[in-house]
Image (cartoon, rainbow, N blue to C red):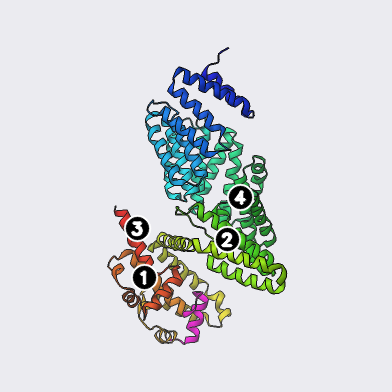
Amino acid sequence: MKLSFDELHKLYFDNENNIKKQILYKDAYMAKAYKENNRIRKARGNYLTALLYYNSDMNKAIQYLDSVIKYSTGINDRSFPVAAYCEKADFLKRQFKFEEAMLNYKLAEKIALQTNLNYYYVVRGYIAVTKSEDLGDYKEALDIYKECFRFYKTKNYRSKKYADNFQYIIFGMANCYRSLKNIDSTTYYNKLGLWETKLTGNMALHYSFVLNEGANQVLRKNYNAALDSIHKALPKIEEYKYTGNTMACYFYLGKAYDGLRQKENAVKNYLKVDSIYSKTKEITTEFMDGYPYLIRYYKNLGDKENQLKYISKNMAIDSVLQKKYRNLNTFLRNEYDIPHLMSEKENLIKSLKEDKVKSFWGNGILILGMITVSAFGFYQFRHKKKYRSRFEKIMKETADKDFQEKENESTKNNKTAISKTDDIGIGEELIEQILKKLNSFEKEKGFLKPNITVQSLSIVFETNTKYLSKIVNSYRNKSFIQYINDLRIDDALENLKKDSKLRKYTIQALAVEFGFNSAESFSSAFYKKSGIKPAYFIKQLEDSIKNKQM
């Protein structure tokens, strides 16, 4: 009895666990398509073939998807070639070819806009996922998620047709807001996702929202609430075999226990993250912070072998991730940079060699050689990304916000004068007088005058150097020199953003403008405060302004 295309298609998917039968039905489908010279059926037949190679041979799968695209292009089918472009993009992402993947998503998006509006927003969702989870472009991804959210809100979004897509869009929005540290919006969309998944019975995604809110509570520093949410999510996520989310559970449990100063529990969970990585060889930059924690922990214990083990592992993972993401604007946020790790490794190796010369001699040379080779290739890359990240962090801070924070801090300092009187041995009334003078000094930008010393300012304030120094240390939490330099650099950052003329000054001229005696002292204070050199900040600032004007 001859079977129709639809019957063969159904039999193919009814036998997902029987490859031999799937091949049989796929071959019959393909033979029928070529016999009838039916282009869309040829396309679908090649698509079924590509799926057979999904987990075994990505390049072979891509070849068949290209055949799908060839046969289905220009025939206005509602599914193809859009589905083929999306599947191909997925394979390319797995090969870390993100630019090619995005190109295929864009082609799918363009066609779907003409042939199938519902599919168009599915593709837009794929693009948002790639931008957020792979490229780290959270703001761009969030804009796309919002666009999709508005579309699904016009539909019957709790119906079988739309519910899953709508809920994944909500999850994407919550995840982006969390990555952008917008805690309140994260909670809002997590709650919305929990409600929608519960109404439609999508419990697999439901517990992902539970986990996501647990991670968000870590940001809020509500560590017990975080533990409660994550412990609820973990058994279900393990049941659904979501390896990435399982790793996330252990990582954020570690962060929560660390926040509660329960070091042993934090270490146990970070070790579980490492255990999952050791089995899967998959990890993202988000979960790398556990390694510096383990390094510090074993260093404090004096356990040199484990300290060296996790330094080496941190470096090895770092190297792999840099190679995979070398074309992206993503960087690893580890507090341990390459030179620091190299130095620490060298010291550990020397120490271990002294303790166990025979057993560690060969391993020490090997590890040192591997570190040198691996570090050389990507040191400059990390250095550049670290500087770029610091620049972006500075740019996010607005002048109004900085000013408000200073005002709030000043008010707080004045209000807490009584409680700190006994700590520094100065009378309450005198503390309040000096704090008021400091506030006025900051507001009127007295710090821009050159050659300010604690002696000269104490004369202006009509007090002695000991009292002024103590009050600055206690109420500004800085040494006097750092206090003056930080005020000057904050003012420099603010004015360089606003004044294009200043950005044309030499470093020496800027130093004089902001109260420093030399270009060297200005550059040193600028770097200490912001983490980047003033010349780099100005160049990036000019580039960002030019890009906005284009």
Residue 289 placement (x, y as % from top left): 58, 59
Tell us which disc is closer to us: 1 or 2: 2
Q: What residue type is labelled 1?
A: Ala
**Which residue is label 3 attached to?**
544
Query: What amino acid is labelled 4 in the image?
Result: Lys
Q: Residues within 10 Å of mark 2 (few under 14, many from 20)?
A: many
Nearest to the observer: residue 12 or residue 471: 12
Q: Which disc, if any, is residue 507?
A: none
Q: Which residue is drawn at 65% across and 50% down?
A: 276
Locate residue 179, reporting x and y percent: 50, 52
x, y percent for residue 464? 47, 87
Mark 4: few/some/many CA within 10 Å (<14, 14-19, 20+): few
Question: What secondary structure prevails in the magenta region?
Answer: helix
Q: Between marks 4 and 2, how big is the CA–CA gap? A: 14 Å
What residue does disc 4 label? Answer: 281
* Range of magenta residues: 462-480
